[in-house]
Image (cartoon, rainbow, N blue to C red):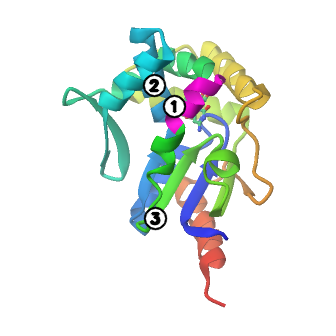
Amino acid sequence: MKNNNIITIDGPSASGKGSLAKALAKELDFILLDSGLLYRAYSYCFEQTQTHSAAKDLFSDLRVESVNHEMHVFENNQDITSILRHENIAKSASQLSSLQETRDNLMSFQRDLASDHGLVADGRDMGTVVFPDAGTKIFLVADAEVRAQRRFYELQNAGQGVNMRDLIEDIRLRDEADKARKISPLKPADDSIEVNSSNLTPQEVLEIVLKIYKENTKEV
Ligand code: C5P
């Protein structure tokens, strides 16, 4: 049975998943799961502990909250979300995400967010592994140059100095690793719909996906 309370959005880095997921959560008043942020938070914990069991304990002490339809992570009441958005954390999250222990340690947290309230889940394996019964599954893609440009502006706006050439290479390597890993690789679910956001505004992407969702949930 399909669960119409869950929309999954998977795809490579900077394909526009984050903005789409946030806009959908706002429009439908759904909870947002930014699973990439959880992988970043876990890797932040692992860096301090160096073992999975201790990282799991430290992770469970973090507070994850929805602020304005966006996921935020707090450590001792301090919002550490912007720290987790740094490129160095993205690199270690990408490495750790290929390990079964990391994925196992985050699985129940992600699944527990599903409820009657509705969930938009953004990540790499939302539609394939974490929520295989989701009623609407989107695989969002965009050309590599467009994605690098988007991430460049995102990081620049966040005050992080980045070199465009390094960024293109980093994104390429992370995407390749996400696709090639044995466990939960980045790939479209068989019942997903691919949307290419390269030449679309965020509003146009939102409208396309809302139409798909409404079609899927239409009473017959
Ligand atoms: O989406 P974001 O760039 O924040 O994700 C950081 C890293 O976490 C990704 O490069 C990917 O390796 C990993 N990730 C994952 N599975 C998810 C979400 C993120 O492996 N569902």
User: Which is in the foreground here, disc 3 or disc 1?
Assistant: 1
In the rendered structure, which segment of residues is drawn in magenta?
98-106
Q: Position of residue 142 (x, y in %)?
A: 70, 42
Q: Which residue is mark 2?
A: 42
Quadrant into which the C terminus falls: bottom right
- Looking at the image, residue 188 lies above or below residue 30: above
Q: Name the element at disc 2.
A: helix
Q: Is residue 193 left or right of residue 149?
A: right
- Report the residue that reaches farthest toward the left: 77
Q: Judge whether residue 99 is colored magenta.
A: yes
Q: Name the element at disc 3.
A: loop
Cα separation between marks 3 and 2 = 25 Å
Q: Which residue is mark 1?
A: 105
10 Å neighbourhood of mark 1: few (<14), some, or many (≥20)? some
> Does the residue at mark 3 contact the one at mark 1 (Cβ under 8 Å)?
no
Q: Which residue is mark 3?
A: 118
Quick one: 29 or 57, which is closer to the camera? 57
